[in-house]
Image (cartoon, rainbow, N blue to C red):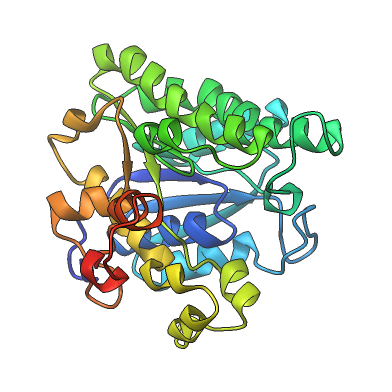
Amino acid sequence: MNSSEQLLRGKVALVAGATRGAGRAMAVELGRAGAVVYATGRTTRERRSEVGRPETIEETAELVTATGGTGIAVPVDHLEPEQVAALVERIDREQGRLDVLVNDVWGGDHLLKFGQRAWEGELRDGLRMLRLAIDAHAITSHYALPLLIRRPGGLVVEITDGTEEFNTAYYREMFFFDLAKSGPLRMAWSLAHELRQYGGTAVCLSPGFLRSEEMLEHFGVTEETWRDAVAKEPHFAIAESPAFIGRAVVALASDPERQRWSGKSVFSGDLAKVYGFTDVDGSRPDVGGYFVDVVHGGKRASAADYR
């Protein structure tokens, strides 16, 4: 989609958890499509969250506006009901509508210790991950959905890591992380049932191997030089830019027949096969197929075969 295709002009979106990574990219691509985008998160130019990274919601809002949309940064801790309620009241007061809700709140990567069993480590860290991945999403939906259903055709996108099929087949190597990333799958399924009578759609969407700011730093590369990291991690060859999942959300939001996806969980690459959008390099990375066939299945193939 290019900047001239303002398919979402007049639409209002809330991207909860839009500070960086997939959240930022989804906000930016929604803006590129012409939407008014409320970008929320805990890290601002005045204060950093527990994640400790420098990206801010103000930067995200500025990027949204630069693409042709309208970006509005609102500091919100989505675990605080009063803050979420105030956010939705503001959207209602300023816009009178909400067309797209993206539940992307996470911020638990700094708590990950893969291989750690349920009875090991700090219990408070595991429970914090569940709060971030489940409670924050539930609180946001509770307050935002009454505004979203005011008009038929609203879209809820729950963001997680992995699809139902993938996460059922493969253990995510940490008890609390596995639970945290399973919650949004069921949320989308449940909301699909509750939104049906209002003409609404709920989908659970997962990025693939995401080239987030943190991941690029981990490998010591940039978005321009990311392929240099393949020597250290061969599977990084299937990595996708954050823009890929952003384009997936725009494809859903602009599809008048999007209810066909309601209740389902999909990778960005699954939607790319149907809608025809590409990543920034013109490819369509199929991380689900690559991990099932090559990483876990032992098939002799390269990442290039899945792009």
Quadrant of res 260? top left
Q: Does 168 appear above or below 246?
A: above
Decide if residue 285 is on the left or right side of residue 90.
Answer: left
Q: Report the residue at 49% width, 30% height from top.
A: 184
Compare residues 27 and 174 and report the one nearer the observer: 174
Quarter in which the N terminus is drawn? bottom left
Compare residues 238 and 67 and report the one nearer the observer: 238
Compare residues 44 and 26 and report the one nearer the observer: 26
Q: Does 289 appear above or below 102?
A: below
Q: Can the viewer see residue 8 in this picture?
A: no
Decide if residue 44 is on the left or right side of residue 57.
Answer: right
Q: Report the residue at 39% width, 38% height from top.
A: 166
Compare residues 157 and 184 and report the one nearer the observer: 184
Residue 230 picture location, percent across and down: 47, 79
Quarter in which the C terminus is drawn? bottom left
Residue 251 picture location, percent across and down: 22, 50
Residue 79 picture location, percent across and down: 70, 32
Q: Can the viewer see residue 126 in this picture?
A: yes
Residue 116 picture location, percent across and down: 74, 42
Q: Report the residue at 39% width, 52% height from top.
A: 36
Q: Report the residue at 26% width, 67% height from top.
A: 301
Q: How many marks?
A: 0
